[in-house]
Image: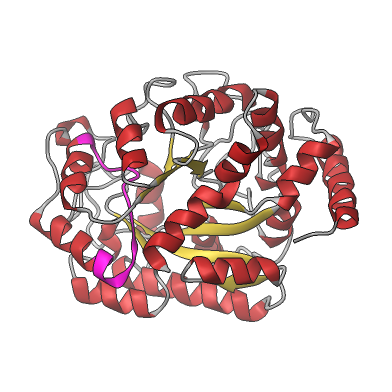
Amino acid sequence: MLTRRELLQRSALTAGALALGCSQRAPAAPVSADALALHHDSLVVDLHVDSFLWARLFGYDMGRGHENRLPSAPFAWHADLPRLAEGGVSAVGFGIVVNPREVRPELMLPLKMLAWFERQRGIEAVLATLDLMHETARRYPDRFVVVGNGTEIRAARAAGKIAGLPCLEGTHGIEGSLDNVRTAYERGLRSIGLVHFQATEAAYPMTVPEFDGRGLTDFGRDLIGEMERLKMLVDLAHVNDAGFADALTVMQRPFMVSHAGCRAVCPHRRNLTDEQIRAVAERGGVIGMVLASSFVADHDANLDRVLDHFDHAINVGGEDAVGIGSDYDGFITPPTGLEDVTTLPRLTAGLLARGQRPQTVRKVLGENALRVITDVCG
């Protein structure tokens, strides 16, 4: 827990950084000292950041501060250890993004392009990314630690370190093998998303209309059972509606949707229906609200449109079901005003300005995510 003096010092630094910004950032939204103090006094958890994709492929140094100099800050350069600290982030679900052994036609173009020159795929790439996360923790022992449960997240925060929870994005990374799941678990993996942008042995992506109506496979059901036995967190981001419904009949534990928006606010296929939001809440799970412009609004995605998603999810699912799942560094273009992780205090200020109680804001910033991680992983 930070002292009042430390909070005020950090608030002043953050306010200065947000106001100064950089050439590609939008003018800073006003963030009061009280909002900054609440933000930095809260445990902030981002359930989905993909920085280690860039670290694995291009040697992106997580320990060095970076800056996206492109207009609208697209694609990457959104997060690193210095900026996570500046943004008040305590813990991150770091997405492990890999290419499948066999690339199918529906795979999104940027991942196809990466697959053309990438040597490591499938479980090889998963294990290599896990090793890289542990190597980053060895390189920066005073700033970063790989964690496996909620207890370790709390310990990391008490020690002033950023906690990284390894999360696989898509079961193509375990190649239809429960043995591979166990191997990756032993190396630190604690969450698996059933699908990414390509059909897998387990499930089908919601972004491909031809897969509508196809639910979980038998392997997908077996996988959920094995993950729950191992105390791993099931992630239903990217899963189509039929697979989502099937998963509800199988899962016995709380789960997460690591990064998604609300379909009622923006009718993108990647977003959740109100029925799905309520299902997450009823199971004691959490939804990480995504900060990808294409999921936030049809056009002119900005902080206000993002807050619309937060408000709607809280109204439909309740204050215990909502968290943050930015998708920073995930080939996204962020909304105006939320160009990288240093801008997250604006979310806190915006939620307060819209009348959300400080207790609700603390839950949304990280307590809900931590509760689910603790309930499932320990």
Q: Bounds of the magenta span?
A: 227-241
Q: Residue at x 65, y 23 (%)?
A: 354
Instruction: Specify whether 320 is left or right of 12.
Output: left
Q: Residue at x 57, y 78 (%)?
A: 135
- Quadrant, the N terminus: bottom right
Q: Position of residue 134 (x, y in %)?
A: 53, 77
Image quadrant assignment for residue 237: top left
Q: Position of residue 83 (x, y in %)?
A: 72, 54
Picture layout, residue 265 above or below residue 170: above
Q: Residue at x 54, y 36 (%)?
A: 291
- Based on the picture, tell me whether residue 204 belongs to the magenta stretch: no
Q: Position of residue 282 (x, y in %)?
A: 32, 40
Q: Which of 345/341 is in front?
A: 345
Instruction: Specify whether 355 is left or right of 1.
Output: left
Picture layout, residue 81 above or below residue 284: below
Query: Which residue in the rendered view is the most extreme toward the left?
Result: 218
Instruction: Specify whether 54 is left or right of 118.
Output: right
Q: Which of 330/256 is in front?
A: 256
- Quadrant, the C terminus: bottom left
Image quadrant assignment for residue 5: bottom right
Image quadrant assignment for residue 173: bottom left
